[in-house]
Amino acid sequence: MPGPLSLLPRRYRIWMRRHGPEALIWRRRIAILGGAILIGVVALLFASLADTANELFHDMIGWCWWLPLIVTPAGFAAFVWLTLRFAPEARGSGIPQVMAASRDPVHGLDRLASIRTALAKFFLTVGTLLFGASVGREGPTVQIAATIMGHAHRWMRIPLRSSVYIAGGAAGVAAAFNTPLAGVAFAIEELAAAYEQRMTLLVMAAVLIAGMVSLGLAGDYVYFGEMRQTLSVSQALFVTPVAGLIGGVAGGCFSRLMLCAGTTPLRPVAWLRRRPVLFSGLCGMIVAVLGIATGLTWGTGYQTAHDVIVGGDAPLWFGAAKFVATLATAVSGLPGGIFAPSLSVGAGIGDVLRSIFSGYPPGALVLLGMVAYFTGVVRAPLTAVIIISETTASRGLMMPLLGAALVSDFAAQFVCKEKLYHGLAQRFSTVG
């Protein structure tokens, strides 16, 4: 029996196929709209649960200061075992997985961006903060967001392209930090090896919608709080290259150590790599000892970074201690990102700069340290500058921040030629 469309004149049937409710263009718009809204909601829920987990851990420390010596190594070992056993693609940051999935979009949804992997990433990352791991939620948000956008397109029977993952990941960055411009910059600089003109609308739409959902539910907020200090031209010319050089070398060292941990032929390290649960337990012990000794290196490091930005004091060794805690967590194989911990390390470097250049605006120096170290690690200067500018409302520092980021990117290349996320992406495959 002929369907209702077959009874219409041919030109109307053609018009309905191209522009009607079942048309590809409408299904694509529904996938983008629905995926971006869900990304915004999930990102806020993720942030709320992560903050709650972090608070519960600090309550535990207040109740019994030595308990992390047991809980943290055991938590590292248990969570790495769970990750390797049930969702090995959920280990680490999540950004390398999105890059790897973008190379093979169709098969990427089956492993690297599967619903199972995203759920594991969500709950395991929150769980890591319950025992003090030095992780952030931003990288995991990128993987979860890319998964949501990918499956929204699959459910609406839209052909999958790499741009779908890139748009989802960019929306994740925007929702995680409340920084829409940083989401676009991250898509261009880091997620997309070659930025295609045709993906512009998809990225912008996903970022805008996810950002509006986040803004509507959480309100208009500045991630680290407003910082209005500026530098004079003479001050900027003097301190910017110094900050960029120190941050670039330090960030490059982190990237090199991170990449070497998975490939070095040194016998002790290779022996431990073959025993990932034992290795993660040892990493957890390092994090526990550092946390108890300093009291400052637990979790994301957000509060310490915020306090330093607004003028609070931190020990000069804070940046180095947070560097070690973050490196130990990152190489352990736990699910979790390095964005927030890296900004915290950068704040420690900025605090050192503040002690050296005592007559300069202190908050501005801290931001220079943050942007320089973050650039040295991630090697995405534009993203680093926009993230710092949007999370601190420090637009008056845009030029010094950009100068420090460019110097840092140049300096980091001499320490670690390979970009961190690109190097880690080579270790993930879309097929079993």
Image (cartoon, rainbow, N blue to C red):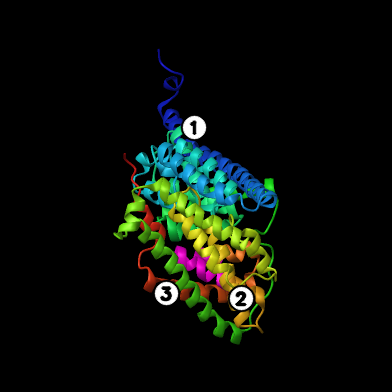
Q: Is residue 332 above or below residue 393?
A: above
Which residue has dot 3 on it?
A: 410
Q: Is residue 241 above or below residue 383?
A: below
Compare marks 1 and 2 and give the one earlier in the sequence: 1
423 horizontally vs 341: left or right: left
Residue nearest the viewer, comparing 71 with 131: 71
User: Residue at coordinates 57% horizontally, 45% vertically from top-left?
Assistant: 126
Residue 270 horizontal/vertical position (percent): 32, 55
Q: Amino acid at mark 1?
A: Gly
Residue 250 horizontal/vertical position (percent): 47, 71
Which residue has dot 1 on it?
A: 20
Q: CA distance from mark 1 to mark 2?
A: 56 Å
Residue nearest the viewer, comparing 222 with 308: 308
Label annotation for residue 365: 2
Of circles 1 and 2, which is in front? 2
Magenta-drawn segment:
368-386
Please, what secondary structure does the residue beneath circle 1 have? Answer: loop
Residues at circles 1 and 3 in contact by the CB criterion of under 8 Å: no
Please, what secondary structure does the residue beneath circle 3 have? Answer: helix
Q: CA distance from mark 1 to mark 3?
A: 52 Å
Please, what secondary structure does the residue beneath circle 2 have? Answer: helix
10 horizontally vs 66: left or right: left
User: Residue at coordinates 50% horizontally, 50% vertically from top-left?
Assistant: 336
